[in-house]
Amino acid sequence: MGIADTPLTKFLREYALNHKSPSLRPRGLTNRSNWCFANAVLQALIACPPFYNLMMSLPLDPTPAEAKTGGVAERQRQSLKVVRAAYEFVSEFEVVNNFPKLNNKNKSKKVDDLALGKNFEPNTVYNALSKASTADSFGHGRQEDAEEFLLMLLNGLTDEMQAILKPQTAANAENGDVAKEGEEEEGDPDEWKEVGPKNKGVITRRQGNPDSVRTPIEAIFCGQSRSSVHHATGEPTATLQPFFTLQLDIQSESTKSVSDALNAYFSTESLDGYVCSTTKKEVEAKRSLSLEELPPILILALKRFVYSETSGGCQKVLKAVDFPIDLEVPHSVLSPNSRSRYQAKKRQYKLFAVVNHNGIEATKGHYVTNVYHTGLATWLNYDDGLIKAVNEKDVLHQYTTNSVPYILWYRRGDTKVGLDKQNSK
């Protein structure tokens, strides 16, 4: 017998992403305990339409019948600590239908014209993540890394949603979706053979939790890369690896733009000392990395903080790296299997948020965020509780000895809707 769907299970399993851009009243986030890294990420997330729409659609309030009887549905809701915290944070923002248009042609961009809401401190998110099992290094009053905070938040949301969906998956397995008793499955259940280019076989493995179920959070942010190894003595192998952020190395002198970094990241390299699993002999081999799946929201993290053998510690890379408002993922970095699925429009992305790190030291500094606000038709700079309008030119060229772009947030072109007409002039 299977487990009946609760409203929450049914919602998570059947939810279709909503990419419509709501016009939210901007609100600053107060910072009493070195939370700038969290505030910067949260302002970018609230500007992400599918994330906002998902959170606001969650059926987290019990029906009258469920409130009386409790049961599975109520226990599910009680288990959602991080999801509930994110929902409460998002609920703090008010949708406003009519904003003054402060585009680049309007030079009067006073704070008083922005129709701001009151500042608040998102303690629900701080507290939920501070108590999470994955928060080993996340503490009150300490400066942390913004990307690590982002990954911890997305992983926390994903884990809680997966825990709700797993019982239903197990029930489906009991109803005949697994091998019958007495039948044996050959090989690794997470390994299969697929037909690659020119009808050549490829042994493919999938990394990650084999029992996990795709959640709406993963549907928004999670992409997938393919690492392929080719050698002369056997079939090529490939590993599929999910990602929430792409960490782009920018140290090379030849890397002057995000496009350069993407091409360098998804490239082919020779493998020294590779031993064939069949012959047990060292053979020549090459590894290529490519993009298997493009997420609706593409998050690029420029590797600003690197370990230096000279100094024996972490150093900040202050070099300027150009990034565009309109980014087209090169066709050449897609895996052969995915190139036909991603035509030009599905490879085009629009920038909507940039998290900057201020300061010359890797272990210190301050985070601020630039966000494109659809309702105001302009970019806003969020510095904890301070908000000001900024020009697009300043967003793209904010390189000083004190401030450099760190995390870039892009929306895929085929997900944009009519309300979201961003001026990129």
Image (cartoon, rainbow, N blue to C red):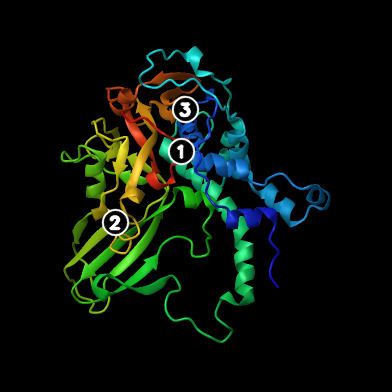
| Distance CA(mark 1)–CA(mark 2) | 28 Å
Measured in 3D between alpha carbons, the distance from the residue under mark 3 to the one under mark 2, in whole angstroms, is: 35 Å
- What secondary structure is found at the residue carrying circle 3? helix
Badge nearest the viewer, 3 or 2: 2
Q: Nearer the viewer, residue 377 or 91?
A: 377
According to the picture, the residue beneath numbered tag 3 turns out to be 36
Earlier-in-chain disc, 3 versus 2: 3
Q: Is residue 44 above or below residue 290?
A: above
Circle 1 residues within 10 Å: few <14, some 14–19, many ≥20 = few
Circle 2: element type: loop
Q: Amino acid at mark 2?
A: Leu
Q: Quadrant of the C terminus?
A: top left
Residue at image point 73% right, 57% down: 72
Please name the residue shown 68% across and 45% down the image: 60
Residue 162, relative to residue 367: is it above or below?
below
Residue 302: percent from left, percent from top: 31, 39
Q: Give the residue at mark 2.
A: 334
Q: Nearer the viewer, mark 1 or mark 2?
A: 1
The residue that disc 1 covers is 418
